């Protein structure tokens, strides 16, 4: 399982690195002004709905059901089920697209009401969103095909597909001169990326012999009935945190120009460890636990969950320390160039530090929620999610006044911890999770290693700034790289030493 996590994580790392390159170019070309704000809204809209109806709800309803049919040896039943779901998703997305395109001004006004006071920015957001919204159709189908491949333990194609989004956007931004502005270039890059990703997943499924076809959905199929029973609560649960994300965009649009962009750039760095580690672990863990539970191996399912949680925490904790101790240096080194000013970097840095508080929780949630989804229980995570969302939205309203856009990220951090605590407590009460000695020792090792890493960041920064010469546009990158190498070496040494002291290896912890 760890090998599969590393495979998915490796491809996701490539995706995040190319995504970082995309964001660096985008920041240099667009900055954090009105064009960037309009594009962020246009890009977030299809992503919000994809997360609600695609990756979030769909995977939790489809993957355990499909994996269960395949594990039971019912190849024909699994194929028929996939055919019907594919046809249903395609038809639904075509209808949604037909409704969304003419209604886009009202959609943008609801998503970013603050833009209404700036007709130029509002009009640009409407135009760009009409270009990006077809991405939702392709990505919903990509999610389905990815779930099928993952259920057959074929992870690489699905994990590598997002790289195409970054490459398409980089190529489009490189041709900005052919478009009215950089916002249009990036939007057309998004639209092209959806088509490219669907083509790649279609090829992967055809090669594996599992590409679904068209078939009329019917509720006479027990698997379909069960799918809809699970899907309803999953949609509401997935919608919960997307509602909070919508609230972020809505409130940020009411703040001074640049708030939406600051939230976006900080979120992109926050999503780097989340995407590489948490999503990789969750992608592998859900079908693994589903298969083991279907086969009656509950202890094996819990052991797999503990390994995934410990591995995820160990790899993500250094990012938490970096975001909390060096947010200004990180933002200046990575984005402060071209149209992205020092003021933009400082605003985004405070948001990044707040997101750092959320990172351990959001990474562990992906492992914790598998206790329920592997048993096709989407109702319990729904209750936990809605409770966390109520906390999230309430805190956004309270914290935005005194802390501005940073308050939005702080509210997200608190709500993620609330969600994790509720999930673990409910799973423990039902006997659906069993944290073991290995996980406890891993947590201890991570805490010790993080203390050493924090000391490197705090006390090493002045030393690194004295050592590194004044290099135009490169000094911050050199300082960050020096601290990163020293911190990584000490973190790895302390973690491995702690695990060795208790007779554990990281891959077995």
Image (cartoon, grey):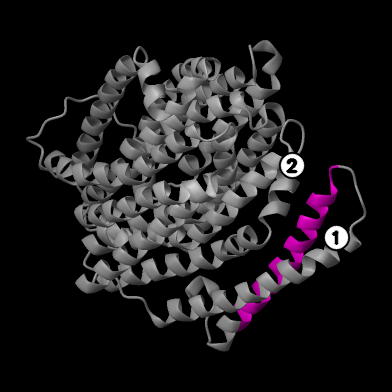
Give the extent of the magenta segment: 473-497
Q: In front: 428, or 7?
A: 428
In this rendering, would 174 be left or right of 415? Answer: right
Outermost residue toward the front in this view: 402
- 370 vs 83: above or below: below
Question: Is 495 included in the stretch rendered in magenta?
Answer: yes
Disc 2, SS: helix
- Residue at 40% x, 55% y is 282
Mark 2 vs mark 1, CA separation in Å: 18 Å
Residue 8, position as x, y percentages in the image: 50, 51
User: Which residue was labeled with disc 1?
Assistant: 465
User: Which residue was labeled with disc 2?
Assistant: 342
Disc 1, SS: helix
- 334 vs 293: above or below: above
By secondary structure, the bulk of the magenta-drawn segment is best described as: helix
Q: In front: 225, or 410?
A: 410
Q: Is residue 152 at all visible to an observer of this figure?
A: no
Q: In front: 178, or 77?
A: 178
Quadrant housing residue 17? top right
Q: Do the residues bearing badges 2 and 1 touch, measured as CB atoms within 8 Å?
A: no
Q: Residues within 10 Å of mark 1 (few under 14, many from 20)?
A: some
Question: Is 310 included in the stretch rendered in magenta?
Answer: no
Residue 313, position as x, y percentages in the image: 50, 66
- Residue at 42% x, 22% y is 133
Residue 172, position as x, y percentages in the image: 63, 21
- Residue at 67% x, 39% y is 344
Give whichever of discs 2 and 1 has the lower sequence position: 2
Residue 253, position as x, y percentages in the image: 49, 32
Q: Is residue 322 at all visible to an observer of this figure?
A: yes
């Amino acid at each position: 399982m760890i090998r599969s996590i590393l495979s998915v994580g490796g491809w996701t790392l490539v995706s995040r690195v190319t995504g970082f390159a995309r964001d660096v170019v985008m920041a240099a070309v667009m900055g954090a002004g009105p064009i960037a704000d309009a594009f962020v809204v246009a890009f977030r809209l299809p992503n919000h709905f994809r997360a609600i109806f695609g990756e979030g709800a769909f995977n939790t309803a489809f993957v355990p059901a499909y994996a269960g049919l395949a594990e039971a040896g019912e190849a024909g039943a699994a194929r028929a089920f996939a055919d019907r779901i594919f046809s249903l998703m395609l038809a639904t997305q075509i209808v949604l697209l037909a409704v969304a395109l003419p209604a886009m001004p009202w959609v943008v006004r609801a998503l970013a009401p603050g833009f209404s006071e700036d007709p130029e920015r509002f009009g640009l957001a409407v135009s760009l969103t009409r270009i990006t919204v077809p991405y939702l159709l392709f990505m919903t189908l990509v999610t389905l095909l990815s779930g099928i491949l993952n259920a057959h333990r074929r992870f690489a194609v699905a994990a590598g597909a997002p790289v195409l989004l970054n490459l398409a956007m980089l190529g489009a931004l490189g041709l900005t001169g052919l478009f009215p502005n950089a916002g249009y270039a990036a939007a057309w890059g998004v639209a092209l990326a959806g088509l490219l990703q669907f083509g790649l997943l279609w090829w992967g499924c055809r090669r594996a012999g599992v590409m679904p076809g068209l078939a009329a959905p019917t509720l006479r199929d027990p698997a379909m009935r069960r799918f809809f029973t699970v899907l309803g609560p999953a949609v509401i649960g997935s919608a919960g945190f997307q509602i909070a994300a919508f609230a972020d965009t809505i409130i940020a649009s009411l703040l001074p120009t640049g708030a939406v962009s600051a939230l976006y750039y900080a979120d992109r760095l926050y999503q780097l460890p989340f995407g590489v580690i948490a999503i990789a672990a969750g992608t592998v863990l859900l079908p693994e636990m589903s298969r083991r539970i279907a086969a009656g191996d509950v202890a094996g399912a819990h052991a797999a969950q503990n390994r995934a949680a410990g591995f995820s925490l160990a790899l993500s904790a250094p990012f938490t320390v970096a975001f909390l101790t060096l947010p200004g240096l990180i933002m200046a080194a990575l984005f402060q160039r071209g149209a992205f000013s020092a003021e933009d970097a400082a605003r985004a840095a405070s948001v990044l530090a707040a997101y750092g508080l959320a990172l351990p929780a959001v990474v562990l949630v992906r492992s914790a929620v598998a206790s329920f989804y592997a048993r096709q229980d989407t109702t319990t995570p729904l209750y936990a999610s809605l409770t966390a969302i109520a906390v999230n939205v309430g805190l956004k309203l309270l914290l935005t006044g005194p802390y501005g856009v940073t308050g939005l990220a702080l509210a997200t951090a608190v709500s993620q911890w609330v969600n994790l605590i509720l999930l673990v407590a409910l799973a423990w009460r039902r006997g659906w999770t069993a944290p073991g000695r290995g996980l406890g020792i891993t947590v201890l090792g991570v805490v010790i290693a993080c203390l050493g890493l924090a000391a490197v960041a705090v006390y090493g920064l002045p030393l690194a700034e004295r050592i590194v010469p004044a290099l135009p546009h490169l000094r911050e990158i050199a300082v960050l790289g020096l601290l990163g190498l020293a911190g990584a070496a000490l973190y790895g040494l302390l973690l491995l030493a702690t695990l060795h002291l208790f007779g554990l290896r990281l891959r077995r912890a």
